[in-house]
Image (tube, rainbow, N blue to C red):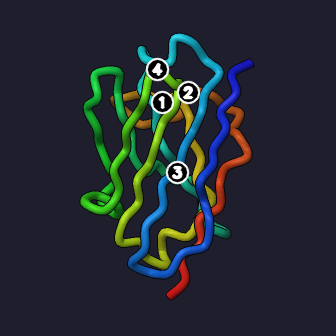
Amino acid sequence: QVQLVESGGGLVQAGGSLRLSCTSSESPFRIRAVAWYRQAPEKQREWVAIINSGGSTKYADSVNGRFTISRDNAKNTLYLQMNSLKPEDTAVYYCNFASWRSGDPHYDSWGQGTQVTVSS
């Protein structure tokens, strides 16, 4: 069973930055598109960003220009650099392997996520 472990969340003031990490037990990690998702209280989980095996990236409009997704295939790790954070970015952040075309998550099961809280 593939494990995805997210970390790096925390409490930050608006305008601040955080860097999230996601480590996968799946091998080979490098050939799969991987994505970040988030779920705010009382809202549905939404797609945030995705990176494919070639390093191409796509972002949701709400985070474009502020967030940067990257990956280190040697470490089986996905990252999300979040800058200029806003209170509306407050959510639990998750990672998953995903469809490059649709952004839909590959696995139905999710890790524990990492909480990001942005205070105004």
Q: Are marks 4 and 2 in contact (CB under 8 Å)?
A: no
Residue 55 drawn at (x, y percent): 29, 28
- Dot 1 or dot 3: first in sequence order is 3
- Dot 1 or dot 2: first in sequence order is 1
- Dot 4 or dot 2: first in sequence order is 4
Q: Nearer the viewer, mark 4 or mark 3?
A: 4
Can you say whether 107 is above or below 65 in the image? above
Q: Are marks 4 and 3 in contact (CB under 8 Å)?
A: no
Query: Mark 2 sits on what residue?
Result: 106
| Amino acid type, residue under disc 2 in the picture | His
Q: Nearer the viewer, mark 1 or mark 4?
A: 4
Residue 27 drawn at (x, y percent): 57, 12
The span from disc 2 to disc 3 (Cα, nearest Å) is 20 Å
Q: Are marks 2 and 3 in contact (CB under 8 Å)?
A: no
Q: Nearer the viewer, residue 27 or 59?
A: 27
Q: Secondary structure at mark 3?
A: strand
Count of numbered circles on the image = 4
As drawn, which residue projects farthest toward the bottom? 120
Query: Mark 1 sits on what residue?
Result: 98
Q: Are marks 1 and 2 in contact (CB under 8 Å)?
A: yes
Can you say whether 62 is above or below 15 in the image? above
Query: Mark 4 sits on what residue?
Result: 74
- Dot 1 or dot 4: first in sequence order is 4
Query: Mark 3 sits on what residue?
Result: 20
